[in-house]
Amino acid sequence: MKPVLSLRGISKSFPGVKALQGVQLDLYPGQVTALIGENGAGKSTIVKVLTGIYQPEEGSIEIDGTPIRFASAQDASRAGVTAIHQETVLFDELSVAENIWLGHAPRTRFGLIDRRAMRTGATRLLASIGATLNPDLRLGDLGIASKHLVAIARALSTEARVVILDEPTAALSHKEIHELYDLVETLKRQGKAILFISHKFDEVFRIAERYTVFRDGQFVGEGAMSAVTEGELVQMMVGRSVDQIFPPRSHNIGPPVLTVAGYCHPTEFADIGFTLHRGEILGFYGLVGAGRSEVMQALCGITTPSKGAVRIDGEVRVIRSTHEAIAAGIVYVPEDRGRQGAIRGLPIFQNVTLPSLARTSRNGFLRLAEEFRLARDYTRRLDLRASSLDQELGLLSGGNQQKVVIAKWLATKPRVIILDEPTKGIDIGSKAAVHEFMAELAAEGLAVIMVSSEIPEVLGMSDRVIVMREGRIIDEVAGDRMTPETLVRAAAGIAEAA
């Protein structure tokens, strides 16, 4: 059988990051190919290449053996490639039929939109995938599973030959997941080539005929699902040693600083409990949707938990706002530094001093010299590379922006610092500087939580690792159990090998 779509030697780079390096992928008619890899393996980038959002720097795309180039998302759609994402890209204020036909609605001979044909066509497309939705319903009144059905019907309305399902079950109930499985079987019978991306191994083995594994932006292997085991896939995903150079650690762990017990959120996480010690770096690992960032945001007052207790040095602290978190000595360096961590239009020194204005002002007036002194002290510790502290933050590299965000929160003199994906999107040199500084902070007695999707970073920097899955703590790993295989197995819900 010949593939409908083939990728050969695809490479794509971003500043400081080689996202894809000569990868390959084949998708066959009437079959599901599972794309497997840990966070940062290049799965999202390849989806954007397939859908025309990114153009590769090297390599070729072939449909039915004929080379083709996707210069835009419209080119990919016209070629029959469509994607249904975890969060459907549809319009809640429009009807089901309007969403299905948006951009290519049938028209009358006078050039007007033919609404009767839209409704009839929408009903036919929905029926072809076993859906009985009313095409006149407002999309915003539907649940997530029904929205997925509308997204798939929209894909079929463009006569898609390749359907990409990107983490489609992340927000579905058990019943809805099985309904999706039935839908995938329907698409297979229609001859669609399906790329299925999921971190859940039970799903992959349930519906896929073939697999392709990426690791660190590179193609690792492919084959039939029937010829591979879970353990072999895990080994392919993480089959590398912790080969980065991490700074030496003294591991001088002190008494507990932060204790969390029975921490719950109505929709994001449940029964979270752990203890963080003075001078410790506690790693949090998990796959997409595990709830790690959501826990950290609640601890820092960004969201509100439904129940649970937080203690700092044994004293119960109620945290309902970021102000209360900072007062308790907890600060959070977010993953999305561009939107949550800093103000790109302000100069460096103002970004650093923003949470510490009480220290840099007198009688309600800011003291510019004190702002510069505070910013200089903390940015020097992080080896910030900038022309001056007056430089606009948005003009810095990603790594240097991250240093400014960390400096900002360190200037508040916290007891606990939470670093969410601290080296995401920054170059190797900047990563080393951030790792070294993290080690210094722990050596000085600061309690550090590091949320990271990079296994070498988690293993190389952490004293212990907490693994989360689907909003719960699944395992706590330390000592000899701190291996790539152990983390991935726990995060993916696979029992440890005997």
Image (cartoon, rainbow, N blue to C red):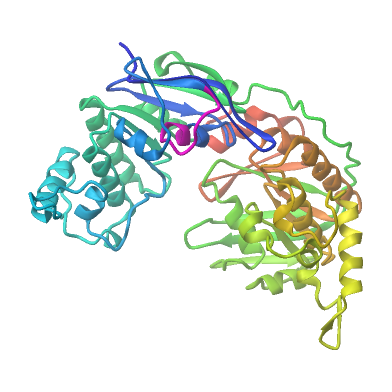
Residue 272 is covered by the magenta coloring:
no
What is the quadrant of residue 204 in the picture?
A: top left
Left or right, 95 with respect to 385, comes to left
Q: Is residue 85 visible?
A: yes
- Residue 188 appears at what percent x and percent y? 25, 27
Residue drawn at (32%, 57%) of the image: 91
Residue drawn at (86%, 50%) of the image: 382
- Asked if residue 208 is positioned above or below residue 197 in the image, the reply reads above
Left or right, 304 with respect to 355, comes to left
Residue drawn at (42%, 31%) of the image: 50
- Residue 492 appears at what percent x and percent y? 53, 35
Q: Nearer the viewer, residue 470 or 87?
A: 87
Q: Nearer the viewer, residue 357 or 171?
A: 357
What is the quadrant of residue 327 in the picture?
A: bottom right
The residue furthest top is 1
Q: Nearer the viewer, residue 454 or 275?
A: 454
- Asked if residue 248 is positioned above or below residue 107 in the image, the reply reads above
Q: Is residue 200 visible?
A: no
- Residue 314 appears at what percent x and percent y? 78, 66
Residue 52 is covered by the magenta coloring:
yes
- Residue 133 appears at what percent x and percent y? 18, 52
Left or right, 175 with respect to 413, comes to left
Q: Nearer the viewer, residue 342 or 106?
A: 106
The residue furthest front is 110
Which quadrant, please, contains the C terminus? top right
Number of marks in the image? 0
What is the quadrant of residue 456 in the picture?
A: top right
Which quadrant, please, contains the N terminus? top left
Residue drawn at (23%, 48%) of the image: 100
Left or right, 171 with respect to 259, comes to left
Q: Which residues are magenta?
A: 47-58
